[in-house]
Image: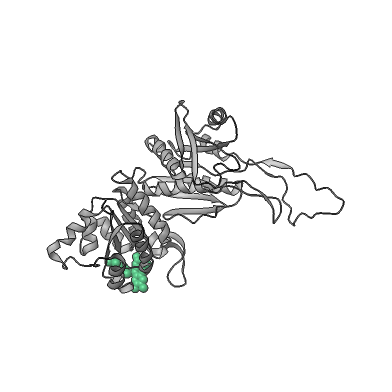
Amino acid sequence: MDKPKVVLGVSGGIAAYKACELLRRLTESGHDVRVVPTESALHFVGEATWSALSGHPAVTQVWETVHEVPHVRIGQQADLVVVAPATADMLAKAAHGLADDLLTNTLLTARCPVVFAPAMHTEMWENAATQENVATLRRRGAVVLEPAVGRLTGVDTGKGRFPEPGEIFEVCRRVLARGAREPDLAGRHVVISAGGTREPLDPVRYLGNRSSGKQGYALARTAVARGARVTLVAANSELPDPAGVDVVHVGTAVQLREAVIKAAADADAVVMAAAVADFRPARYAEGKIKKRDGEEPEPVALVRNPDVLAELSADRARPGQIVVGFAAETDDVLANGRAKLARKGCDLLVVNEVGERRTFGSEENEAVVLAPDGTETPVPHGPKEALADTVWDLVSPRLA
Ligand SMILES: Cc1cc2nc3c(=O)[nH]c(=O)nc-3n(C[C@H](O)[C@H](O)[C@H](O)COP(=O)(O)O)c2cc1C
């Protein structure tokens, strides 16, 4: 079988050197990659590096190898174009359809999915011109990743950082796997909670649960590949931040509620995959609780935590917002799930059976998605990503 053909467009940002790692990941996983750098990109990483790593000449202008008509052919033949890093300049050119070098010509001739991984200083990213260009590209069906937050060139820190190349590779893999299907969540903002909350007893101890965050992270990654802008509220997960996702790290149920409600204000859908503790210790000890000779420990009194799923379902931040819950049950899974769906008032409830060796921390899951009209969608045992895609398959047509 022919290898999938990927065009790696590299524009002139300092993160161009990180695109070498993305190129390696793509070639080593069996993709045929043509690198198309801009002239500015060659100031950062030279033609020799791109050619040697890709096994193809890395051409910048339409005037080289003219007999092969590269300004048309490269785009036409591609299965995926990924521009990483995408400069503010490149986003502007792409949004306006300029074609003054080989990469911009390729973007106009490509019929395949296109992914942009912008990287720039925060001021450039937040500039109204850049934001409008990004919105234009997303509206046309391109996947434009939100940059990460962190160290930028020089001493600056903020939003605009190039996401980890391994995570951009994951986005490319998923977008390629979707083939010609439209990014059905393009222009949508989705909020996902993931992980498990920890409710502190004292400065060193907490009440927690076994959730790893893998299901919520799979929901975030699949939503990015389907074109959504994604906010992930992550409770105590050790997983790497997915590329293109705004990640808000929280610890407790109360913090999670605050972050989810804030992000949900302009969200089209909210998926509550986090394991949120129902109770928290009534009292937090400022100092470590000591073991005293001859004394039994005091019992731990608990109080209820807010029910975030019920609250989101009852007070929709905007009309037509879709709210999805997850219910982990150990017995009477379906009956408990149906009762919970009615009680919480959400649009979909993903019910799965959990146990010490089931679901938590595993790469796989098995579930039934319940809807208020009685529909049940069983999802057979398989990768958490497959369940995530089924959730979006059900959410997408419900969006206003
Ligand atoms: C040291 C240096 C670093 C730069 N880093 C970035 C960057 O990270 N993102 C960006 O949008 N522009 C950056 N620029 C500006 C671009 O190189 C400039 O806008 C150029 O015209 C982009 O051309 P291109 O889009 O054709 O590659 C940088 C410039 C310099 C000199």
Q: Is residue 346 visible?
A: yes
Q: How is the image coloured?
A: one colour
In front here: 191 or 378? 378
On the question of residue 268 being in view, the answer is: no
Q: Is residue 170 left or right of residue 83?
A: right
- Residue found 23% across the figure and 60% down from its top: 104
Q: Is residue 348 above or below residue 2?
A: above
Ligand 1 image-quadrant field: bottom left
Count of residue discs: 0
> Which residue is most to the left?
67
Could you say which quadrant of the image residue 52 lies in?
A: bottom left
Left/right placement of residue 237 relative to residue 371 reads right
User: Percent x, y for residue 58?
Assistant: 25, 67
Above/below status of 40 relative to 25: below
Image check: 242 left or right of 338? left
Quadrant location, the C terminus = top left
| Side of 64 where 333 appears, left or right | right
The residue at 42%/57% (across/down) is: 167
Residue 154 image offset from top left, x and y in percent: 44, 73
Residue at far right of view: 294
Residue extending farthest to the top is 374
Give the image location of residue 356, x and y in percent.
61, 42
Q: Pinpoint residue 394: horizontal percent, then vertical percent.
A: 41, 36
Which image quadrant for residue 307?
top right
**At x 55% / y 52%, what residue is drawn?**
237
